[in-house]
Amino acid sequence: MPEEIADRDKVADAVLDKVKHCTIGFARAGETPAAKGSGVLIKRGDRHGILTCTHVDKYLRDLKRSVGIVRLNQGLAQQSATLEMDEVFSYAAGEEPWEGDDIAFIHLPPHLVGNIEKDCVFLDADKNFTKPEPEDSSSLLQVHSVFGLVEKFTGTTTRQGGRATTLLKGVLTSGVLREFDKLIATLECFNENLAARAAAVCGGSTCANATTVTLRPCTIG
């Protein structure tokens, strides 16, 4: 394996190892379970919350029911965390048909922050915004990551001993960003061929959700 590819794969693994601790998925449980978006755990000053898309925030509020929070760093472990959207406030930009701004910050109260921090990490926005950037980035290895729950991977709900369990699966993979605009990002994946709504990642730090992410396999010579 060429040295550059080996280094790239090491960087990709390191990025994924960090990203998985600060990403979550939103899910609808019950008799008609479904994956309903994803978000990034982020803090700025004393404010903690979830960075997601406005269309996701709107959909979750329109459900008018508890929303499941899936921690992507927990693997196959059973999870039971929920979010009551009528108990939280969102700062949102954008409106249908979502051709321009489409970003929202769901502000979480302290008791929810403490519960989530037991397993996950809130990215420090102030630290990320002020980190130094090299004048010449041409020599840097470009690695981006995408994540999200995938609708077609959602399993049925089973019941046992008074507990209802729904199987949800997500995508967490790395690649190189080939095309990017306000609505569509194309990521050339290193190992997988996937197509799903996911989060766009800038320079290794998660920044926002993309409306559509097209993933395609990367051929390595």
Image (cartoon, grey):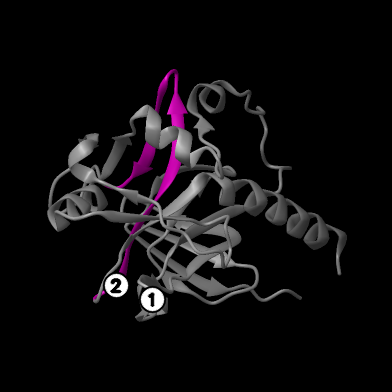
Along the line of sight, the residue nearer the viewer: 39 or 192: 39
Residue 185, given in percent of the width and then of the height, sits at 42, 58
Name the residue that disc number 1 marks.
Answer: 154
Name the residue that disc number 2 marks.
Answer: 33
Q: Amino acid at mark 2?
A: Pro
Residue 46, given in percent of the width and then of the height, sits at 42, 19
Specify whether 168 is left or right of 53: right
Instruction: Name the chief secondary structure element in magenta.
Output: strand
What element does badge 1 sit on? loop
Residue 118, given in percent of the width and then of the height, sits at 55, 40
The N terminus, quarter of image: bottom right
Query: Where on the picture, by quarter, is residue 12?
Result: bottom right
* Picture residue at 46% right of the left edge, 39% below the top: 115
Magenta span includes 48: yes
Q: Which comes sooner in the sequence, label 1 or label 2?
A: 2
Along the line of sight, the residue nearer the viewer: 125 or 175: 125
Residue 191, given in percent of the width and then of the height, sits at 64, 72
* Picture residue at 14% right of the left edge, 46% below the top: 95
Specify whether 195 is left or right of 220: left
Which range is magenta? 32-53
Q: Amino acid at mark 1?
A: Thr
State if disc 2 and disc 1 touch (CB < 8 Å): yes
